[in-house]
Image (cartoon, rainbow, N blue to C red):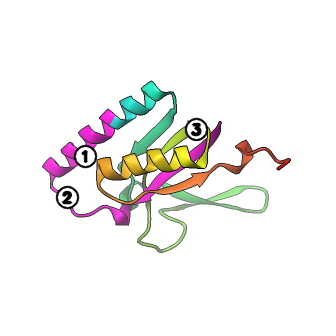
Amino acid sequence: MALYLIAFNDEWVPDLTMDDLRERATNARALINEMTEAGVFVFSDGGLDASTALCSVEPGDGSPVFTDGPFVETKEHLGGFAVVDVASDEDARYWAGRIAVAVGWPQEVHRFPHRVPLDR
């Protein structure tokens, strides 16, 4: 089994009404229940955008240096994510596809490399 991050940027989310958002949230909760029953669900969260950025931290001379807001000027912000624990890239792609359809916007899939055997 390997851990995969399935994520989307906030800018990929189309303009939606509150009713649209509630419908997508209902679809997402149903899919999370299905993923939990399948034993692949680890964690998910969403609703992130520029307004949720708390601070940035840079390494100082032995001490962290905190600044308000995002590190760089960008319109791209993590909008939400799910972490799944599945046997293969194909399985991760399957669940990412299901999420994309459930919420109606693109997803991106990343494999956490530390869970991949190093002796390939």
Distance, label 1 to label 2, CA atoms, is 10 Å
Q: Which of marks 3 and 1 is nearer the N terminus?
A: 1
The x and y percentages for residue 71 are: 55, 67
Residue at the extreme bottom: 73
Q: Which residue is drawn at 21% across and 49% down?
A: 21
Q: Mark 2 points at which residue?
A: 16
Image coordinates of residue 67 in percent, x first then y, are 55, 62
CA gap, disc 2 and disc 3: 31 Å
Which segment is the magenta one? 1-30
Q: Residue at position x 32%, y 35% from top? A: 29
On whether residue 19 falls in the magenta region, the answer is: yes
Residue at the image position 73 percent from the left and 55 percent from the top = 63
Residue labelled with disc 1: 24
* Pointers 3 and 1 in contact (C-beta within 8 Å): no
- From the viewer's perspective, is the residue at label 1 or at label 2 nearer? 1
- Residue 28, located in which quarter of the rendered image? top left
Whether residue 29 can be seen here: yes
Q: Which mark sits nearer the N-terminus, 1 or 2?
A: 2
Q: Distance between the residues labelled 3 and 1?
A: 24 Å
Residue 27 is left or right of residue 82, and the answer is: left
Residue placed under numbered mark 3 in the picture: 86
